[in-house]
Image (tube, grey):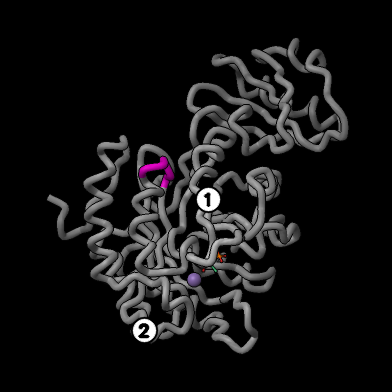
Amino acid sequence: MLIVMDHHCTQEQVREVVRRIEDKGLTANPIPGESRMAIGITGNQGPLDPNDFDQLPGVLEAIPVTRPYKLVSREVKAESTRVKVGKLAVGPPDFIVIAGPCAVENERQCLQAARQVAAAGAQMLRGGAFKPRTSPYSFQGLGRTGLEILRRAGDETGLPVVTEALDEESLGLVVELADVVQIGARNMQNFSLLKRAGRCGKPVFLKRGLSATLEELLMAAEYLAAEGNYDIMLCERGVRSFGQHARNTLDLTVVPAAQEQSHLPMFVDPSHGTGRRDKVAPLARAGLAVGADGLMVEVHPEPHTALSDGPQALFPQQFQELMGTLRLMAPLLGRTMSLPAELTP
Ligand code: PEP
Ligand code: MN
């Protein structure tokens, strides 16, 4: 159930509605909107009666929410969310590019990558310190040291940093040192991790599971929102399919579908989505064209030496060219992209 408050409602009227909800043993989730305040009700086992709420002073209407996900749905919040990350607002009309190496390997590599992606106009820096690897013998990431290196690289270039928390232990460290917590594809349905991330106080970048439906992705986001964290960015990163021509099948159809169902920003990751360097730029352009709110792209100063995901990492020069193309395309699609510092007039 969604309680929509009148434009002119008072704080006391909002408090009274919240009290009524809580008296029934339910949870009230205030959702401030551009034009009016709404309060989402969660925690009910069966349907609620709108008559219990729509006569209260200051209430405009009480609307039953038909989707299984509620707080992240457009039914509950019609306008697109802009997630604040430092000085950035992620969401339309801005188009945000997050770039950097798959993994933080050492100080030199990370700083070099950070400078290269910043110079090309990326707005956020990525780099894994806790890596979910298929083989236990593959490079697992530098852990805390990697986070500290990433933090320094972010501070030096002025880019907010995004990095993955693999479990509850690494979540604490990521929250301490990063600006955005990434929940990876393999953890999309790790519900205890999602609950903790929902209480962590930092924005979350949530990647779609390897074989998750859109509904499952939105339910995972709902776990975060139900704990009070609305600062969520979703990301399509390719799903398992039968094709042998790419690492995964990048499901671009999910982008407009997610944006229809949810107010949250939706990203595309053409790097994990294709697994092949030569396919990254075409699918990145397609991501912008299909209406994504941003991209996550892997870039490495020397891809041939990369300790993880080298075959899909762009050379810095390729990334720079891609950014130039995206900046040309963006205005045609009604999107805004900021210029790198040295091109800013
Ligand atoms: C990543 O972005 O570093 C990553 C491991 O991606 P995914 O969870 O999508 O596989
Ligand atoms: Mn990777």
Q: How many marks?
A: 2
Tag 1's secondary structure? Answer: loop
Q: What amino acid type is highlighted by mark number 1?
A: Asp
Residue beneath disc 1: 251
Residue sitting at x 31%, y 78%: 301
Residue sitting at x 61%, y 89%: 137
Tag 2's secondary structure? Answer: helix
Residue beneath disc 2: 304
Which residue is at the far top? 55
Residue density around tag 2, few if under 14, some if 14–19, many if 20 or more, within 10 Å: few
Can residue 225 be seen?
no
288 sits left or right of 309 in the view: left
Residue sitting at x 22%, y 55%: 324
Mark 1 sits near ligand 1, with its Cβ under 8 Å away: no
Residue density around tag 1, few if under 14, some if 14–19, many if 20 or more, within 10 Å: some
The overriding secondary structure of the stretch rendered in magenta is loop
Percent x, y for residue 238? 54, 58
User: Looking at this view, is 68 or 338 the one in front?
Assistant: 68
The relative height of residue 209 versus residue 140 in the rendered view (above or below) is above
Q: Which residues are drawn in magenta?
A: 289-293
User: Looking at this view, is 175 or 339 the one in front?
Assistant: 339
Percent x, y for residue 262? 57, 37
Residue sitting at x 35%, y 75%: 300
The relative height of residue 274 versus residue 34 in the rendered view (above or below) is below
